Image (tube, grey):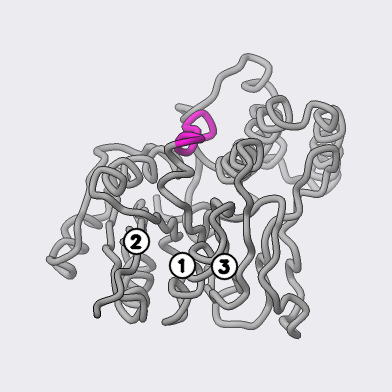
Amino acid sequence: MVTLVPLVYILILNWNNWPDTVECIDSCLNLTYPNKHLLIIDNGSTDDSEKILRERYPGITFIQTGRNLGFSGGNNRGIEAAIAAGAEYIWLLNNDAVVAPDALEALVSALDADAHTGMAASMIYYHGSDRIWSAGGSWKPGSLKLRQRGAYSKDSSQYRRNEYVGSASACSLLVRSETIQRIGALDESYFLYWEDTDWCARALSAGKKILFVPGSKVWHKVSASANQRSKLQYYYYTRNGLLFFQRHDPVCFPLFLMYTLADVFICLVRGRTEMIAGFLQGILDYSRQRFGHRDFEFKAKHD
């Protein structure tokens, strides 16, 4: 007797970073989970990514969006295709991540075991180490706890059990298609940063739990597509954070604004003018309710 297992679509979004995408795909080809379909989405890369990836992986489905739609827009094109193809589960996976062979199997098993769970998140480490980047997110309404749990700490089995969390990073996030059909896809107003936290908040509001699964192990090259502490990072983090708290946690909105302004002051003291520009532009655009892709120049790693 053949046991049917759910069809999982693995979405890998690329933008001007085919070397990391190759490493990610190669790790996915070693996954033990049998019923999977890889889908590469390219966000209008200008570094020959499409040519290189199509030639290297002729059997993998490829979507070209034609322009940079951001993390949310690019993944949404993949989500649409996955649902149309009948996928029961959709795995969002950063292209700058590599996965353990049983990473997907652990996530699927966790969702299969609990019909009330809408999303399952991996244990994510800094690339090449046992230092934790995320053991699930710590956000909950009424609290300004925004950090990833366990961030920077060495894995000493302090997170050894599956447990419900308040949010999760879409660096590695398995989502039921039924959940997406109920709450909608990623919000493209964010373009970059906070879209996954918003998605989790919407899932929780709809009664869908978020489960952290430590048995699913992923290693992440943090901020490979956008330089850490860049103007781009601070702009989108500030603007989109204000939008998130306006929508989901208005009690903490003024606290986040004060937290942001404190960071501006610290950058001013340290002479980090690019970061100040990102902060201030983010606040200005939020006040004007200008969201989505901001059409001005930012310096990114793979420009």
Q: Is residue 152 left or right of residue 18?
A: right
Crowd around label 2: few <14 · some 14–19 · many ≥20 (10 Å): many
Q: Which residues are magenta?
A: 182-190
Amino acid type assigned to the residue bearing label 2 in the image? Val
Residues at circles 2 and 3 in contact by the CB criterion of under 8 Å: no
Query: In the rendered structure, which disc, 2 or 1, sits on the residue that comes first in sequence?
Result: 2
Circle 1 residue: 108
Q: Nearer the viewer, residue 25 or 263?
A: 25
Circle 2 residue: 8
Q: Position of residue 175 (x, y in %)?
A: 47, 53
Q: Position of residue 236 (x, y in %)?
A: 60, 37
Q: Nearer the viewer, residue 47 or 75?
A: 75
Crowd around label 3: few <14 · some 14–19 · many ≥20 (10 Å): many
Query: In the rendered structure, which disc, 1 or 3, sits on the residue that comes first in sequence?
Result: 1
Q: Secondary structure at mark 2?
A: strand
Q: Is residue 177 left or right of residue 254?
A: left
Amino acid type assigned to the residue bearing label 1 in the image? Val
User: For the point 81% across and 42% down, which residue is it?
Assistant: 263
Circle 3 residue: 122
Q: Position of residue 109 (x, y in %)?
A: 49, 71
